[in-house]
Image (cartoon, helix red, strand yellow):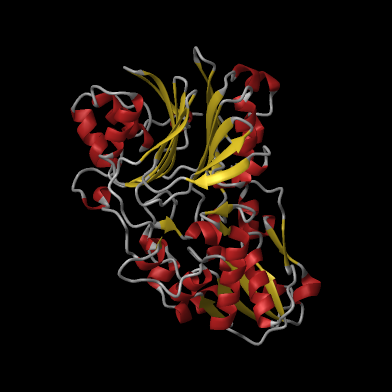
Amino acid sequence: MTQISTHPWDDDHLKEECGVFGIYGLEEAATHTVLGLHALQHRGQEAAGIVAFDGHRFNAHRELGHVADHFSSEKVVERLKGYASIGHVRYSTTGETILRNVQPLFADLEVGGFALAHNGNLTNAYALRRDLVRRGSLFQSTTDTEVITHLMAAAGRGSVVERLTEALLQVEGAYSLVALAEDTVIGVRDPLGVRPLLMGKLGTATILASETCALDIIGATYVRDLDPGEIVVIDRNGVRSIKPFQKRPHRFCIFEYIYFARPDSIIEGHSVYDARKRIGAELARESPVDADVIVPVPDSGVPAALGYAEEAGVPFELGIIRNHYVGRTFIEPSDHIRHLGVRLKHNANRPKVDGKRVVLVDDSIVRGTTSKKIVEMVRAAGAKEVHMRISSPPTTYSCFYGIDTPERSKLLAAQHNVAEMAKIIGVDSLAFVSIDGLYRAMGQPKRDNDKPQYCDACFTGEYPTTLTDQTDTGPKQLSLLTENA
């Protein structure tokens, strides 16, 4: 197989997590699942999979690559017969990018077939897996998600929902799950509600999805977000809710509003687009600068830059144009193409920056390499001054809840103060929104340091769960089998 390697300019951004979608009670359920996964493609672009149930058997298709690459074929969708279906788009945060890791995972349990798709990350997966292997479990993938199915098998008795509940009582971390059993679709959010999961309706059918944009694409209506710690069971008897977990403070991931969710989604009652504009306005109030033009780093910086420009009273311009036809991976790029780097994705719009004092607005700085190249590009296009404003606090800690972040030693903000960072990326000034400013933009007076309203561990280092696999003395790396996918 041809070697596929990640763009060197892509590893300077926090990677999306995963997206999940489920539907019960609609003929051609898989077709609607394909559309839902299209809308959630931004959440995971390495692989996609669908499992459907037709009343007698489970029908599955999983592939590496984008949804459109593999699920546009009528022949593929025809094989996915059924009135119930779940789907998953993946960016791997644990396990290699190989076909056996593509979700939904499927297991034959004592109580019947069971398919599972997971958004998030379990922080005690290695410890649990090691114990299960010692007890005789044979794992087929290297993902943390498979731990859940083995815990269900080890439960020994009970219904599918009872076994799933018993398994989840043993795990730590973040998870939003959609599962498909015989004649049943199940949705679960972890007790902290770190990752999103919501419910919708399309006629008499019930839908589960990571974001409302997946409802919009199929014409479904939003019903509600699942509560933290809630299990929703959907079958021919309707929808029932179970809350078997001890109630804990809600700690939804605040980075969903900064970057991960699609701007046209509404999550937990907040318009993502409006939240980003408010963050930009807060940033303008906290860190004003004399400037001629506000320029977003596309696409994720656009709403925040609009908010900044409106609050500052400075013109907004698309001073950088993004090439939307460059994928996340490139087949065997030459050294020359690698050297061009960021220019494949972004190009300065010279008439809008030449001779101007420019404020670049972006959502985050991770390693700083892409920011440096963009600043160089804007200066080369004639900018008189280049200032940078970031619509998140400095990213100083790694995430262990389903977002692929570099190790802490490679995070620029963990190794340097703001003045040093400004010098490294080559800007005249650099500022980040404060943690309290971020919370104000989300409608809170400030961050409650005793009981934080969101999960903000990537900024504060205050992790809301135990990080067993980070402190455990056992091996942290699974035995991996290299495969050609």
Q: Residue furthest front?
A: 237
Q: How many marks?
A: 0
In this rendering, position of residue 74 left or right of residue 23: right
Image spot of residue 448 (x, y percent): 36, 71
Viewer-side residue, 419 vs 232: 232
Residue sitting at x 40%, y 66%: 459
Residue sitting at x 24%, y 26%: 155
Viewer-side residue, 398 vs 331: 398
Say if 344 sits above or below 395 in the image.
above
Residue sitting at x 36%, y 52%: 192
Location of residue 253 (image quadrant): bottom left
Residue sitting at x 59%, y 37%: 201
Image spot of residue 3 (x, y percent): 55, 37
Say if 17 sits above or below 73 in the image.
below
Determine if residue 53 is in view: yes
In this rendering, position of residue 217 left or right of residue 484: right
Say if 49 sits above or below 287 in the image.
above
Q: Residue furthest top?
A: 56
In this rendering, position of residue 296 left or right of residue 481: right
Q: Name the quadrant of the N terminus.
A: top right
Viewer-side residue, 459 vs 161: 161
Location of residue 382 (image quadrant): bottom right
Image spot of residue 233 (x, y percent): 43, 32
Say if 251 sits above or below 55 in the image.
below
Determine if residue 117 is in view: no
Q: Residue furthest right?
A: 351
Q: Residue furthest bottom?
A: 290
Image spot of residue 324 (x, y percent): 71, 51
